[in-house]
Image (spheres, rainbow, N blue to C red):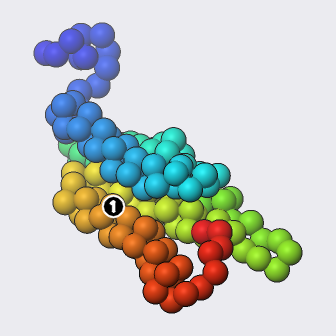
Amino acid sequence: MTWFEGIGIARTHIPEWEIALRVLMAALFAAAIGFERELKARAAGLRTHMLTALGAALFTVITFEIFYEVRTIEGGGNVDPIRIIEAVTAGVSFLAAGTIIHGRGQIQGLTTGAGIWIAGAIGVACGSGYYVIAFFGVLLALIIIVLLRWVERHALDTKPGPD
């Protein structure tokens, strides 16, 4: 019996150290995207991206724990963890949509909204323990946000605009 069980806290099926690693990695990976947004003084920056990924990772870990718990119950029903992932995706999409502003014939915040959406996906990947997938997601997101901005402004010779 662990000290958790001794005070009435249910033991997790995923080791506690691994849960801590999953949520920490989600926050750190998303920090890379959030930091870039912060440098560009965007509405959603470091904290928003980190919290989005953290929340997505927590929901994902909780999904796995519920799945394991229900499977251990005799005659336990069917559990579909994808439903919670869908709910996380919908919630993150709502946050991302809130960063998009349309006015005076211009749309602003699309890149930031997409970054929040990616942060949610990174959180789900880390919450599932798929750190390599999350790493490649962060790497590609930063290439797209930073390198392609440079290409748009310099190589394509377009006027700078908000992202």
- Taking depth in this image into account, of 111 and 82 the one nearest to the observer is 111
Residue 88: % across, % down: 48, 56
Residue 36: % across, % down: 46, 55
* Viewer can see residue 63: no
User: Is residue 163 shown left or right of residue 20?
Assistant: right
- The relative height of residue 89 versus residue 62 in the rendered view (above or below) is below
How packed is label 1: few (under 14 Cα within 10 Å), some, or many (20 or more)?
Answer: many
The image quarter containing residue 157 is bottom right
Q: Residue at x 51, y 89 (%)?
A: 156
User: Is residue 10 shown left or right of residue 93?
Assistant: left
- The relative height of residue 36 versus residue 107 in the rendered view (above or below) is above
User: Is residue 163 shown left or right of residue 18?
Assistant: right
* Viewer can see residue 128: yes
Quadrant where the C terminus sits is bottom right
Quadrant where the N terminus sits is top left
Residue 60: % across, % down: 35, 50
Residue 70: % across, % down: 29, 45
Q: Which residue, given by chain and number where applicable, does mark 1 sit on?
A: 138
Q: Residue at x 37, y 43 (%)?
A: 27
- Tally the marks: 1
Could you tell me the amino acid type at mark 1? Val
